[in-house]
């Protein structure tokens, strides 16, 4: 992401960040499945990452996190004015988004 995460979320809601996290999970799984360096040296194993990616995918579906801001079924729409909950979810997604790519570069 070239723009700051906060700028993207301010314009596009949580969905773009959720989509980026999903993409990073896919990239990590691909790297682990082919034993690409330097990922092969990480203490992560493909079954563990697949399990976590599956849980994340279920969370995405259950919360509507992939729906765009204007959609009534979106996570942003569901949260309404619950800023404290939205903030906690945003912080968690930011940490997840930053952790997966960093793990690939170790």
Image (tube, rainbow, N blue to C red):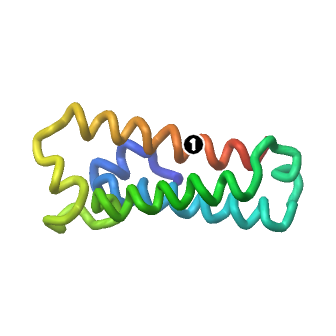
Residue 82, quarter of the rendered image: top left
Q: How many marks?
A: 1
Name the residue located 51 percent from the left edge and 55 percent from the top edge: 21
On screen, residue 62 above or below 86: below
Residue 93 in the image: above or below residue 22: above
Q: Nearer the viewer, residue 49 or 7?
A: 49
**x and y percent of residue 65 in the render?**
32, 58
Q: Residue furthest left?
A: 81
Residue at 86%, 50% (x, y): give it: 38
Give the secondary structure at mark 1: helix
Query: As rendered, which of 97 and 45 lies closer to the eye?
Result: 45
Where 64 sits versus 3, above or below? below
Q: Give x and y (percent) for residue 96.
A: 52, 43
Instruction: Sort mark 1 into few (<14), some (14-19) or many (20+) by Cα contacts within 10 Å.
Output: few
- Residue 77 point in image, percent of width and height: 16, 56
Per the image, the residue denoted by label 1 is: 98
Q: Quadrant of the C terminus?
A: top right
Q: Is residue 19 left or right of residue 79?
A: right
Picture quarter containing residue 98? Answer: top right
Q: Report x, y in % for residue 86.
A: 26, 40
At x 62%, y 65%, the residue is 26
Q: Farthest residue in the top direction?
A: 84
Asked whether, in this view, residue 60 is left or right of residue 33, the answer is: left
């Amino acid at each position: 992401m070239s723009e700051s995460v906060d700028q993207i979320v301010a314009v596009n809601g949580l969905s773009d960040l959720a989509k980026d996290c999903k993409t990073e999970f896919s990239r990590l799984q691909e790297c682990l499945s082919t034993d690409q360096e330097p990922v092969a040296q990480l203490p992560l194993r493909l079954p563990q990452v697949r399990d976590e990616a599956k849980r994340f995918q279920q969370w995405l579906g259950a919360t509507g996190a992939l729906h765009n801001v204007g959609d009534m079924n979106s996570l942003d729409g569901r949260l309404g004015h619950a800023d404290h909950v939205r903030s906690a979810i945003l912080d968690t997604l930011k940490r997840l988004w930053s952790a997966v790519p960093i793990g690939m570069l170790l």
